[in-house]
Amino acid sequence: MNFGTIFTLYVRNLKQYRRLPAVLAFSFIVPVIQYLIFSNLFNSLAEVPGNPYGEYPYYLYITPAIILLTAIFGSINSSAALLVDLNTGYFDKLRATPASLVPQIIARFMSEFTRLSLQLTLIISVSILYHKRVSGILELPEAGITGLILIVLLSAGFGIGVVGNLVVALAFKTKSDQAVQAVFPLFFLAVFMSTAYVPEALLPDWLQSAVQYNPGEYMVQAIRGIFLEGFVDSTVDAIYTALVCIVFLTALTSYMNFKVISSSID
Amino acid sequence: MNDESVVTVKNLEKKYRSGTHAVKGISFEVKKGEVFGMLGPNGAGKTTTLQMMGTLLKVSDGEIYILGHNVLSEGEKVREKIGFALQESGLDSLSTVKELIAFHIKLFGLGNSNLAKRVEESLTLLDLHEYSDKMIPELSGGTQRRLDLAISLVHSPRLLILDEPTTGLDPSHRTDLWKLLKKLKEEEGITIVLSTHYMEEADYLCDRLAIIDSGEIVAIDTPQKLKKTIGKDKIELKLFESLNKSQKNNLDGKFGSGNIIYHDLSFDILVDDGEESLLEILKDIINLDIKVKGTKILRPSLDDVYLKYTGKRLEG
């Protein structure tokens, strides 16, 4: 495998976004709007007697949820440019050049990882600025710059490794943008079926048990820990659990992806 | 023609998971500088064969060597040396013509120092200058085909694989593309393997031809030799009035009774080469005092060849 070829494809993929303004705009604007609406709409929840969000205002509590949702939402869009190539036949055209199957997939994930990291950096910046507006203090999350980088890497890793692999497999299988977009509500529900928006104590009993089986929950715990608590023991544990979760699910979805792509060229 | 083999296909098989047996043990060889064609209807196995040659499909059984490299074990080397234009000209719809050519030059690791010059050369070769800044979806089908060829040629491949290169093009674009392929063969010495279901195209472009039916090669040779297997050329002579017995006897004596077919107001003479024999035959007919209203040379076509080997007509 030639790394020069992967890099050429990677740069070309990034340049493609100039011609997909809708994807680019929605990738960046929607999470910001969502963050601002949710923060404003439910901020008063933290002021009710017996505040279930502990010492944090609601907009800080849900920041990890918006970050995770941005990662998932952005990864679902990652199939858009790939579908253009698949449906025009250009993907196959490239397979007959040094840009065969594996370099194309790797370059695609690399460019999506880059775009997603920028999206996540933007949403984290917005949350920091929002915090300054409300509290008057400009401060980084508890874990500092390292924590910020880790949040971006964990979220983008989960987004591209797990969700990206699934939507790419679906794109290969169906070659349909509608089919790929149709899976979005599933992930949306998965985020709601966690402590992303409400603490565990407020969830119904059955959901409190189900949360333990939701990979999204482990991501939320790790991001929230880094964001609000810093690198304390419970955060480090949550980061390890999230990493194991990402590695295991990425391996699983990569295998599924490999099987689907292999059968499509068999 | 140089005898160096560019493509060697041995007992090639393709069975899909669905159970379809698309290619059934075909073998052929393509020499350097040749234009080799595969003629057959849709579903005959042409595209499957070409896609296996281009490393796009897995080989079920058999072997393919391209420029000495085994396609199964040395796919990467094969891809570096071939140019492949697929049946549907799949191009990056998010690029301009110039951007796409530049990208393909870079893909082959060629554009570091003189990218602009190479892009210019590609635009010139395929006469694409006027479209250089246009987005690809804005181009006509014919221009997209030319662009597809341009990006397939950026690395000066020694073998060009073309899957139905003129399907969907109007007659004028088709003729333009034929001329271009002739030029590539004659001026660049490039070896071309193409599939087609147009007999005229196969006849015009191909040095040798494999007729494919249901995944099998049923005949393989030059178009001329394949047509010779059908029989002789026919010279049809139309008459003002029917021949009398003595005229028929004279004709039988002159050309041999086995070489003449009589009709009501015409007769056919079978010859090896109609064009070459026509003048001599007309002189003989005039000497026999037979008045001829008109003549026509009827030659066996590739359609006749296809019919002979497959029992079906190939519409093109």
Image (spheres, coloured by chain):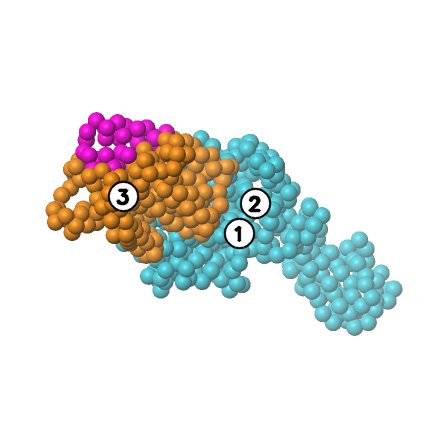
Chain colours: A orange, B cyan
Magenta highlight: main SS: helix
Q: Residue A234, position in %: x, y?
A: 23, 28
- The image quarter containing residue B242 is bottom right
Residue where numbered disc 2 is placed: B46
In the rendered structure, which amino acid carries the disc numbered 3?
Ile
- Above or below — where is A65 with respect to A242? below
**Residue B226 in the figure: left or right of residue A171:** right
Left or right position of B258 against B66: right
Q: Distance from label 2 to label 1 (Cα)?
A: 9 Å
Q: Residue at 41% of width from left, 60% of height from top?
A: B137
Task: Locate residue B76, reporting x and y percent.
Answer: 40, 36
- Taking depth in this image into account, of B154 and A227 the one nearest to the observer is A227
Whichever of labels 2 and 1 marks the residue nearer the N terminus, that label is 2
Residue B146 bears which disc, if any? none
* Residue at x 44% of width, y 50% of height: A177
Q: Are marks 2 and 1 in contact (CB under 8 Å)?
A: yes
Task: Find the distance from the CA under tag 3 to the CA under tag 2.
Answer: 58 Å
Q: Which residue is mark 1?
A: B164
Range covered by the magenta-colored residues: A221-249
Give x and y (percent) for residue B5.
49, 38
Contact? badges 3 and 2 (CB < 8 Å): no
Question: Between marks 1 and 3, how big is the CA–CA gap?
Answer: 57 Å
- Label 3 residue SS: loop
Is residue B74 in view from this perspective? no
Q: Quadrant of the N terminus of chain A?
A: top left
Vertical placement of residue A128 versus B63, above or below:
below
Check disc 3 and report the residue beneath it: A62
Under circle 1, the secondary element is loop
What kind of residue is marked 2?
Answer: Lys
Left or right: B80 with respect to B197? left
Which chain is home to disc 1?
B
Q: Is residue A239 magenta?
A: yes
